[in-house]
Image (spheres, rainbow, N blue to C red):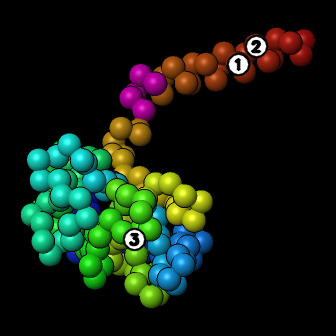
Amino acid sequence: MTIKNAAENAFVYTLVSDQRFWFQDLTGCGNGPWLGGYQDPTARGYAEGATHRTFTDGGWRWVNESDGASFDTYYSWSGLEPNNDCWGVPETYVCFYGRFAKTGLEWNDLPNEGEQYKPYGYIVEYETASAIPEPSSWVLLACSGLAAFVLRGRKRT
């Protein structure tokens, strides 16, 4: 999943704004589904604990940057996020965030450990064209269905 601009961020949020995809942390802030962002400590721009106000990139990446999305060109961090501040546990993943609210369009960095931070959902982006079977697959499926029908008919007689 990648988010390239504010319109795309708002659209994705509408898909997961239902409370069943969110949990409230100890401060009463809403943490939503995981997005496809993560902090890569091997990245050239990596900066531990740097906020979006003090870094050019911080090592934040999308799982699929092949479509041109980048944290350099668009981000929706909340307040002083990302701050890598979770009571001593590194925060290296991105989720939707509602600062002192149940839900929100902004982002937070969270750890991928600890019972209280298990996400209630995540967002997956995929190409629909790859989900459509090739025409040869349809022919194979039709032939196997026909064969099953013929064999089923033979057992009855």
Q: Which mark is residue 151?
A: 2
Write the residue at 40% across / 28% down.
135
For disc 1, the marked residue is 148
Q: Residues within 10 Å of mark 2 (few under 14, many from 20)?
A: few
How many numbered tags mark residues here? 3
SS at circle 1: helix
Residue 63 spot, x, y in % from top left: 29, 47
Q: Nearer the viewer, mark 3 or mark 1?
A: 3
Determine if the magenta segment contains residue 115: no
Q: Is residue 34 above or below residue 134?
A: below
Q: Secondary structure at mark 3?
A: strand
Q: Is residue 117 above or below residue 22?
A: above
At horizontal 57% and vertical 18% (from top left) the residue drawn is: 143
Q: Indicate which disc, 3 or 2, sits on the residue closer to the N terminus.
A: 3
Q: Position of residue 140 (x, y in %)?
A: 51, 20
- Which of the labelled discs sits on residue 21, or is there none? none
- Residue that badge 3 annotates: 96
Q: Give the left or right position of residue 37, taking residue 51 as reference.
A: right
If the image is split into quadrants, where does the C terminus sit?
Answer: top right
